[in-house]
Structures are given as C-alpha cells and as structure tokens.
Amino acid sequence: MKTYTATPADIDKKWILIDAEGVVLGRLASIIATRLRGKHKPSFTPHMDMGDNVIVINADKVQLTGNKREKPNYWHTGTVGGIKSRTTGEILEGAHPERVVMQAVKRMLPGNRLARQQMTHLRVFAGAEHGMEAQKPEVLDVKSMNSKNTRTASTSAKDTGASNTPGNV
C-alpha cells in the first residue's frame, strides 16, 4: 500500500466564517490553526498548503480565562533600552483588538515558511462587518462544538465569589 500525497490539483480551499463573540481565545485559536493547516481534511499532507481561508468577526469580543487579561505582552523597538509592554486587556480595548487573535493563531502554527504562507489566508475583523461576502463563506459555529468553548462574564469564579479550592474547580 502506498502513502497518499496530495498534489496542488487535489487541493480544494473553502471559505469559513467564524464569530468570535464570547468564545475563549485559546480554543478559538486552536480551531482556526487546524483549519488553516488543513488537518481537518482526510487528505492532509504536511508539506502542502491544504487549509481553508478563514474569516473571523467580532475579535474584540473574545473571552480570556483566568488572569490572562492582565498578562503583559512584550516587544522590542530595536533601540537600546527599547523594551515595551502592554497587557492583553489594553490591546483588546485599543485600536487593533484583532491582533490578539492573530498572535494567538500565529503561535499555534509551526515557525516555518509554510506557516507564514498559511497566515495570509486568515482575515480577522474587530467588528461584525467584513468585506468577504462575495466568497460566500460557510459559517462554522465554534460555540456549539463544545460547551467549554464559550465563556460569559458571569461564569467566572471571581464574579460568583467562589474560591479556588479543589471542591469548586
């Protein structure tokens, strides 16, 4: 029996629309990374760009678990003493909240040329409007895939007054 390897003629790319409102960031990023790589397809070939084109809307309404909103994100300007930081919450409330989703997906892909090419197939929008109606994207309902994919502000332990003891976890 021979191993199947896909050729460029075998690749069928679809357009997927994902609504990120109320979805946990890490779970959303792993689903998007799987779709971008094409690992959800039975004809997956690791060295080919098999993935779908993904459109994410409402990226500014993505949810974070724990204290990840206060986690600092660092970058360097390239000058001496040029280390900068901003918390994830500040980025989500700033001018470009879609960068949080882009960075989470980028970190879930391998660090090679193919992954950089696959990242060009991801479009993230902060609001509900996107200019991709002509592609007729299929809606992927991430919220209904698993009950752990969603999080509302009232379900966190901090808001309910529950402590982090083993009985309340």
Image (cartoon, grey):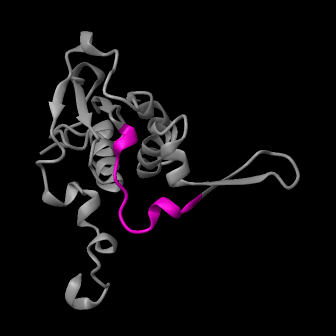
Instruction: Say which of 105 and 141 sits in front.
Output: 141
The relative height of residue 120 versus residue 30 in the rendered view (above or below) is: above
Residue at 19% across / 42% down in the picture? 40
Query: How far across and how far down the image is residue 96, in percent?
Result: 52, 35
Instruction: Say which of 80 and 49 sits in front.
Output: 80
- Look at the image and say whether residue 65 sits in the magenta stretch: yes
Residue at 88% across / 52% down in the picture? 80
Q: Residue 154 falls in which quadrant of the image?
A: bottom left
* 74 horizontally vs 40: left or right: right
The relative height of residue 153 versus residue 125 in the rendered view (above or below) is: below
Query: How far across and how far down the image is residue 62, in percent?
Result: 35, 47
Residue at the farthest right position: 80
Q: Residue 47 falls in which quadrant of the image?
A: top left
Quadrant where the C terminus is found in the figure: bottom left
Instruction: Say which of 116 and 153 sits in front.
Output: 153
- Look at the image and say whether residue 23 sits in the magenta stretch: no
Quadrant where the N terminus is found in the figure: top left
Q: Residue 98 falls in which quadrant of the image?
A: top left
Residue at the farthest top position: 134
Query: How far across and how far down the image is residue 106, in percent?
Result: 46, 44
Q: Which residues are magenta?
A: 59-72
Instruction: Say which of 105 and 51 sits in front.
Output: 105
The relative height of residue 116 versus residue 157 in the rendered view (above or below) is: above
Residue at 24% across / 44% down in the picture? 39
Query: How far across and how far down the image is residue 68, in percent?
Result: 45, 63
* 164 horizontally vs 102: left or right: left
Residue at 25% across / 57% down in the picture? 151
Q: How many marks?
A: 0
